[in-house]
Amino acid sequence: MYTPEQEQRLTRLTETLLKNLSAPHDAEEAGQYIALLREVIPYHDWRYYVRSEAVISDADYDRLFTALRQLEERYPQFQDPDSPTQRVARTLTKEFPTVSHLVPMLSLENSYDAGDLRAWHQRVRELTQTDLIPYCVEPKLDGASISLIYENDRLVRGATRGDGIEGEDITPNVRVLRSLPLRAPLTAHGIQRMEIRGEVIIPKEAFLRLNEKRLAAGEVPFANARNAASGGLRQQDARLVADRQMEAIVYHISYAVDASGNDLLARSLNSHSGNILLLHRLGFKTPHGHLRCFSDIEEVIAYCQQAEQHRENYPYEIDGLVIKVDTIGLQERCGATSHHPRWAMAYKFAARQAITTLLRVEFQVGRTGTITPVAKLEPVALSGVTVSSISLFNEDFIREKDLRIGDRVVIERAGDVIPYVVQAVTGARTGQEKPVVFPKHCPSCQALLHKTADEANWRCVNARCPAQLAERLRHFASKDAMDIAGMGPATVEEFLQAGLLHRISDMYRLDPEAIRQLPGWRDKSVSNLIAALEASKNQPLHRLLYGLGIRYVGETTAKKLAEQVTDLREFTRWTPEQFQQIEDIGPKVAASLYDFFQQKENQEELDELARLGVAVSRRQTEKPAGPLSGKTFLFTGTLTMKRKEAEELVEKLGGTILSSVTTKLNYLVVGENPGSKLEKARKLQTVQILTEKEFGELVGKS
Ligand code: AMP
Ligand code: ZN
């Protein structure tokens, strides 16, 4: 950890370096630059990876990093294995050598309820011959365990747990984890050599993104963050380790000696909670924020039960809590079995796995024609919900897991993630199981399915495919799109069957008389539906655009796009390059948009919608006229007034809020700690940049 004074100094130093990254005059000056860069870069790693609060932009970080790398290349005499540039080894590790842990890495004993914990407390009292036991409770991280050795302030070894006695030496890979310092000021605390334990995890958010990326790249998603982390740590190419967004959280000092070889545990390092705080101060990521200490086992129990209710609030997966005797002296009196220490106990949360039977696989056609295999399961309870159907993503996923019809399968629900098939229980096979046959033809329209090399899913490309039509209609009417109350999936299906709908615009041609003929429809429900359809005609442009169901165009993209035009039909004249100019739109999305707006049927459909009264162009009435009419605004950084209030003020005066910096932007209002928008606006040179004070004057005066 850095003191406020150190932080100030390093922040100033960073600014100076960023301004003066010119070529040094001689080797001596280069050496000075290098030393300073090696001081500030680990500081920013710590801000970013341990504190999760960066103080400089990614671009500036990259500039510092590149500068250091270039200087080291030009002046190789300053090479240092602990330089931030040396985190990633460029060689492949063929085999990880086996190494012995300084202290065996044991398992934990498990408890599941209050009774288990009370019985354990009783045993601890007997073993320690004391009644007052201080306890600490911390999250049980569900990742891959690691052991690290630091010597003379340097990280010298990282290893997997292995069998607990011996593990694999994965030093090149743990060095890549930026949440781990390569150097830490241990000797300043009298520690010459130290072995610590921790868990390598992937935060939930990062894991979701990782899997989305894998799916988009046509790869099989990871079953859970734990597998992705333990596999990630054992990759042969250390350069790939960084891709998995892993973090190391350390929670235990298992060994610590001073320069004369004296054991420091139970001496200067005499409490578990104190040791965690020390690790935190040394710059490690620790669970100190989630550490609770109690002096009464009943308080421990109450806390455990309460924490289980909130397990979703942790940013990473936890499978329980660990209760530890806080005083190291008392821990030593408890001792250990060959399997687990007697001074610690895991409190396991309810299982999130279940085993059930894979009954069959159905193939669903999405609104853009994507075929998704869906497992139909014997219904089974899994952390509070009944699961009977789970997506299998794509063909590769089924092949990779070798899932067969009739298999017993393990399913898991991790965090807020939707349930997932982990694996087939191959040991339970009877020989009667049948392979999953992937269809060659669309299950709805029988058209031949297509798949390009860069995609994971087969698709039905028949524009008139009824299954796609049904999905498109449902999507159009859904809450986040045109939000047509009464036009739910069942109604869409009913109208399709009755031949009332053939394309989206048919919704606005629905004849009340024809609906009334259908069973179950009354005057009231018909008039409600017609009213809802009428109301939807004035939905904002971005909802209509999103509702059209263009491939890869989600809500955010639709919003960004809609800002660019006053009539959606303008897009029929756009080139793929124009689409790509918009923030976050890459070649794939641009191509999809271009294709959509080039198709004659789609162009006609937009004209039809306009003719039927749907707002295809921005209405004059959408914005109240005011002194800021026609002016566009965007805010960045922290303002003294609430961001929302500022935005509402602009809109009240007739102005528009944009979501990104483009040539359409007139004013960028800059608060404290502005983001990358400021840089972008400066580059464009067409945007007027205002301080909050200037903004106040603008809205006050006008
Ligand atoms: P198990 O493998 O279920 O017997 O649990 C023991 C493992 O839990 C240890 O080897 C650690 O890798 C892991 N673990 C996760 N969080 C903690 C923690 N806070 N304290 C101790 N062990 C933990
Ligand atoms: Zn089809």
Image (tube, rainbow, N blue to C red):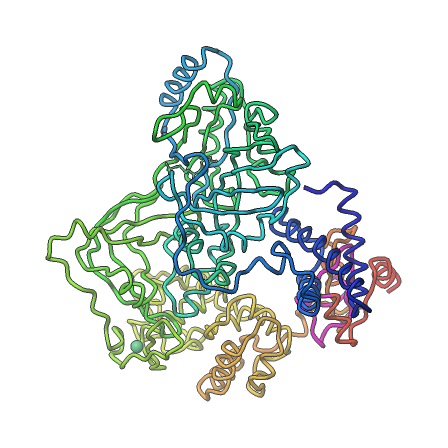
485 up-or-down from 193: above or below: below
Left or right: 593 as drawn, with respect to 700: left
Q: Position of residue 437 (x, y in %)?
A: 20, 69
The span picked out in magenta is 652-677
Assign the N terminus to one quadrant of the image: top right
Q: Position of residue 698 (x, y in %)?
A: 85, 63
Tell me which secondary structure the magenta stretch mostly adopts: loop
Quadrant in which residue 352 is drawn = top left
Assign the C terminus to one quadrant of the image: bottom right
Residue at figure coordinates x 48%, y 84% from the top left = 595
Residue at figure coordinates x 51%, y 80% from the top left = 593
- Picture quadrant of ligand 1: top left
Is there any visible trace of residue 384 in the rendered image? no
Q: Position of residue 247 (x, y in %)?
A: 53, 49
Please state which of residues 410 and 654 is positioned toward the viewer in this rendering: 410
Is there any visible trace of residue 247 in the rendered image? yes
Left or right: 614 as drawn, with respect to 338: right
Please state which of residues 642 and 636 is positioned toward the viewer in this rendering: 636
Q: Position of residue 633 (x, y in %)?
A: 74, 67
Give the number of callouts: 0
In magenta stretch: residue 200:
no
Left or right: 20 as drawn, with respect to 275: right
363 up-or-down from 340: above or below: below
Please state which of residues 522 and 96 is positioned toward the viewer in this rendering: 96
Residue at figure coordinates x 31%, y 76% from the top left = 466
Quadrant in which residue 322 is drawn = top left
Left or right: 519 as drawn, with respect to 13: left
